[in-house]
Amino acid sequence: METSDERGAQTVNWRQAVSREEIRDLLQPHDLRSWGSIALNWAIVFGTAAAVARWPNPLTVLVALFVIGGRQLACAAIMHDAAHRALFRSRRLNDWAGNWLAAYPVWSDTDRYRPYHLEHHGKTGGPGDPDLGLVTPFPISRGSLRRKVWRDLSGQTGWKFAKASWRRTFGRIGVDASARKAAIGVAASNAVLLAIFTLVGHPALYLLWIGAWFTTYTLVTRVRAIAEHAMTPAALEPNDPLRNTRTVVARWWERLLVAPNRLNYHLEHHLLMTVPHYNLPRLHKLLAERGVLEGGCVERSYWRVLQRAASA
């Protein structure tokens, strides 16, 4: 059985395996690539909505809800990069784009998410980790996981989140300047979405955005949380970054639906949290080629993670 000292040695090895020059290059944001990620995200949203307008039937609506739910998670991923100031070189542009092109449309706020999320990085898997409640119940039974999935897809989880979000933003606009800013952003960005669909003659398409937020977005957010930190080998020793966070080697359809913008490379993100998302695959390749990930928590698919999550 490995000792704590051996695990600590592996943690040091990842820094020895990657040179300072390589790290410096990995940390550099490339504005065009960030714009490309944002543009692709919204192109998929509007393209999916256009497909429903062209072929309106229950099947296209169902597919659209899952695709758009994945794109809403992609918005959360863009906000996440912005929270780490890894989206654009300009801080002003970084925060503006993170809010108006990603966070506000999905009822989030980069400015208030940042301190919460940085606390998660500082206390990953240990006491005080604000995300601990998302992953500690696992593994659970298959029946329990099915009930969670049903609550997500039936909108019950989304309604719970909506009430909490309302209290956090619109419920505090009279006493909290940051809440007022977020409330304006959420209302204005969603009004723009509705206006776009109205201008092209299909205002009802906005219901796809709302419907996905209440259903498939909550489901893929749950899957993401389970995959990133639940049932990791370092449950008893959370300070080991190679074992308290999981990377999933995602297939193309998993990247479309549950792991947009390289969210699947979460172990690498925790090692170097300001690496832009498009550089994470390169960091993963470097670590894998140099043997660092042999001792890391890497899974081959999201399905395998969910099977473990429902194995109690």
Image (spheres, helix red, strand yellow):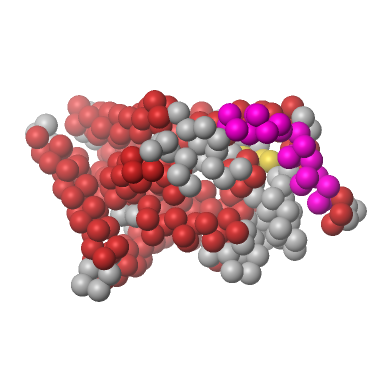
Q: Nearer the viewer, residue 20 or 104?
A: 20
Instruction: Please state the horizontal and vertical placement of residue 18, each as a whole percent of the image.
Output: 71, 33
Is residue 310 magenta-colored? no
Q: As drawn, is 285 to the left or to the right of 276?
A: right
The quarter of the picture where the C terminus appears is bottom right
Rendering quarter of residue 20? top right
Q: As drawn, is 194 to the left or to the right of 115?
A: left
When the figure is inspected, residue 303 is found, relative to residue 131, above or below; the finding is: above
- The answer, for residue 142, to whether it is visible in the render is no
Q: Nearer the viewer, residue 180 or 258?
A: 180
Q: Kindly identify the residue that appears in the image at 35 percent across and 33 percent down.
A: 38
Instruction: Please state the horizontal and vertical placement of residue 135, each as a whole percent of the image.
Output: 58, 60
Is residue 16 magenta-colored? yes
Instruction: Please state the horizontal and vertical placement of residue 41, each as a whole percent of the image.
Output: 35, 33
The furthest residue to the right: 1
Q: Kindly identify the residue that appears in the image at 87 percent across and 54 percent down.
A: 5
Instruction: Please state the horizontal and vertical placement of residue 235, each as a whole percent of the image.
Output: 71, 60
Q: Kindly identify the residue that appears in the image at 40 percent across and 29 percent down.
A: 31
When the figure is inspected, residue 107 is found, relative to residue 16, above or below; the finding is: below
Q: Kindly identify the residue that appears in the image at 61 percent across and 54 percent down.
A: 229
Q: Which residues are magenta?
A: 7-26
| Main secondary structure found in the magenta portion | helix
Rendering quarter of residue 151? bottom left
- The answer, for residue 165, to whether it is visible in the render is yes
Q: Nearer the viewer, residue 145 or 233?
A: 233
Q: Nearer the viewer, residue 138 or 18?
A: 18
